[in-house]
Amino acid sequence: MPLSAEPRVPWLPWSADAFARAAREGKPIVLSIVASWCEACREMDDTTWADDAIAAAVARGYVAIRVDSDRRPDINERYNLGGWPTTAFLDAEGALLGGGTFVGVDRMPGVLARVLDALARGVPPIRRDERRSPGAVETALQDVAIAERVMAAFDEDYGGFGLQPKFPHAAPVRLAMALFAETGGRRFRTIAERTLDAIANGGLHDRIDGGFFRYAASRDWEQPRHEKLLETNATLLGLFAEAHAAWDGDLSRDAAERTLEYLQARLADPDGGFYGSENAAPDYFRAVNREALPLPGVDRALYADANALAVSALLATSAAVHDEDLARGALRSLERVLLACYQPGGGVAHYFDRSVGIRGLLWDQIAMIHALLDAHDLTEGTPYLMMAEELGHYVLRTMWDDAAACVVDRAAGDDDIGLLRERRRPFVAGAEAARALSRLERASGEPSFRGRAAAILDALAGEAGGEGPLAAHYLLARREVSSR
């Protein structure tokens, strides 16, 4: 969807019709992947894509397709070339010809001409094989060795995991908390506490409007990107609530309360559920008079996965601070989003925004299963468990790859064009699927769920050692499965 007020490029949505037009007219495709919260995307709309000569060249030589990465994460996962905006060039079959991220108005005419020239000369498309095949992975590392690799990514100087940019990874903190509870190893608690402190008190925290930014560009948690996503804030709310419940610390309680206040004040829909993101003004921290700045833009779509994370976080917070009203509000949001997005036999759609978005994405189903099971744990309500089972069966029916003995990231769809034809095995979503299926088996007593959970972890085992801090998702899932 266009971000500028008057886009001059004739953007089309991703569809079979758009690709058929490219084939019929013998034209390549320029694919623009954007996000509503992305400052650079708006800048490219207001400069490059607003240039009359560039818009005319695109209309003359290309079929132009625009994708919102929040609404189509499956397309973004396959075609993103290193950030937003992504400017990718495809042939009429959807194969990647080349591309990059931001392309300025001075460079774009040459880029457009070179792509057409390469296509005329028959330059072959780029084949992207980002994952090793299941038969090529090494023998699985032991869990202890993988945990050591996760903790080795801890930044001793500034807290958090990795150097820069700094993302607020929650899974390795949860793993450190769990290892401390089991072993009493003081280092695990130090890792968790220093990371929580760095997130809560560093530049990632918005001290003006509340909430947390998506990531910081520098190792010391400064130079934050100004967009604020529901997914980020829901994840951190849940993490701080868990830390407070485990250790009863003032820092975690205060951070949870501040995050909750932000969600309720800025992203809450009055009818239930939470909006997807908020974009801050580019000169956010340079402003002397805050009131003179334009109000940030809010993506008012209700995303199923992010709302499920928010529900789980709210329920965890309600338990940690003993707030029954908060739990009731979380259940109301869960039911509102489910009512909007669920289709019998078709799982949950990725979002609702006056109409429902794409269906059949793995992460939406898995996040919603976790939220439903959290609701069932609190209320013992049978409908929550029944819906979670329904979504679990939907995943295994439509997103199970027998050859790989693992889940894939999406069900087959009518718009399976180009790289969408590939059945990809996601690491983080796969690990979370294993954890969800194991929880389903425990709650429902259906053993087939646990068998599939164990198979997923076996399939992912060879990749875990190379996933850095994200391997914590795998280890947490392994602990869930082995606890049965």
Image (cartoon, rainbow, N blue to C red):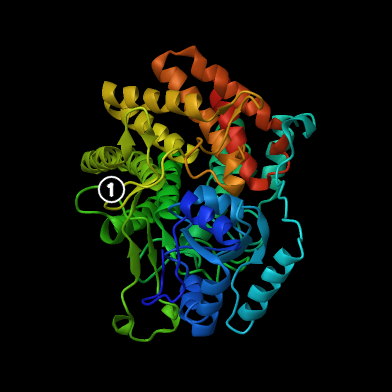
- Name the one closer to the observer, 202 or 27: 27
Q: Residue at x 66, y 56 (%)?
A: 96
Residue 314 is left or right of residue 285, and the answer is left
Residue 179 is left or right of residue 262, and the answer is right
Looking at the image, is 280 positioned above or below residue 338?
below
- Name the one closer to the observer, 391 or 480: 391
- Name the one closer to the observer, 339 or 287: 339
Q: Residue at x 34, y 69 (%)?
A: 297
Where residue 111 sits: x, y (%)?
Answer: 66, 75
Residue 95 is left or right of residue 140, and the answer is left
Which residue is most to the front?
A: 24
Looking at the image, is 14 positioned above or below residue 370?
below
Q: Disc 1 marks which residue?
A: 273
**Is residue 178 in view from this perspective?**
no
Where residue 395 sits: x, y (%)?
Answer: 47, 29
**Is residue 5 in view from this perspective?**
yes
The amino acid type found where label 1 is placed reads Gly
Location of residue 60 (image quadrant)? bottom right
Location of residue 110 (image quadrant)? bottom right
Location of residue 105 (image quadrant)? bottom right
Where residue 176 sits: x, y (%)?
Answer: 59, 41
Count of number-bearing discs:
1
Where residue 408 sits: x, y (%)?
Answer: 57, 34
In which quadrant is the N terminus drawn? bottom left
Label 1, secondary structure: give it. loop
Q: Residues within 10 Å of mark 1 (few under 14, many from 20)?
A: many
